[in-house]
Image (cartoon, grey):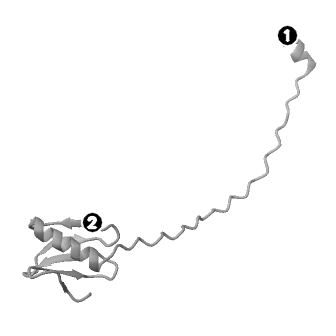
Amino acid sequence: MQAPQTINESYYCLRQKPEGPISILTTNSYVVGEYDVHTGEVRWGRVVLATQKVQIMNYLHRHFPLTPLPAPMPVATVVKPSRPTKPAKAIKSVKTSRKRQTAAA
């Protein structure tokens, strides 16, 4: 966890994990929002004055510039070995006698 950084007299920010979101807190430790450094978005969970929001967002953009998400690791495709095929059984041809062929015609 990083040490809290004071934004102004009413708010400070805190990051729990090195790559995690930055929490925006009041001096009474109420979480009012989260800042995502990968997208630059602030998600507000509580009402904050518009003038305070502008100050907070300017501070966050200045001190925590956008960092792109790391490229996803290529997923190795696992190819199942095919089952060994059994040789096909020989089909016996049925020969009909000439008598049957002439009788059917």
In the picture, residue 94 is in which quadrant? top right
Please report the residue visible at 18 percent of the width from the left and 76 percent of the height from the top. 24
Q: Which residue sits at x=35%, y=72%?
A: 66
User: Residue 69 in the image: x percent, y percent?
Assistant: 41, 71
Q: Residue furthest left?
A: 28
Q: Name the N-terminal-most of marks 2 and 1.
A: 2
The three-letter amino acid code for the residue at tag 2 is Glu
Instruction: Please state the horizontal and vertical placement of residue 89, each as a whole percent of the image.
Output: 80, 45
Note whether 65 is above or below 44 in the view shown.
Answer: below
Q: Which residue is mark 2?
A: 41
Disc number for residue 87:
none
Q: Position of residue 91 (x, y in %)?
A: 82, 39
* Residue 51 drawn at (x, y percent): 11, 68
Q: Is residue 102 visible?
A: yes
Front-most of 20 and 84?
20
Within the image, what quadrant is residue 15 found in?
A: bottom left
- Local secondary structure at mark 1: loop
Task: Using the image, tell me which numbered label, if any, was put on residue 105.
Answer: 1
Distance Cα–Cα, label 2 vs label 1: 85 Å
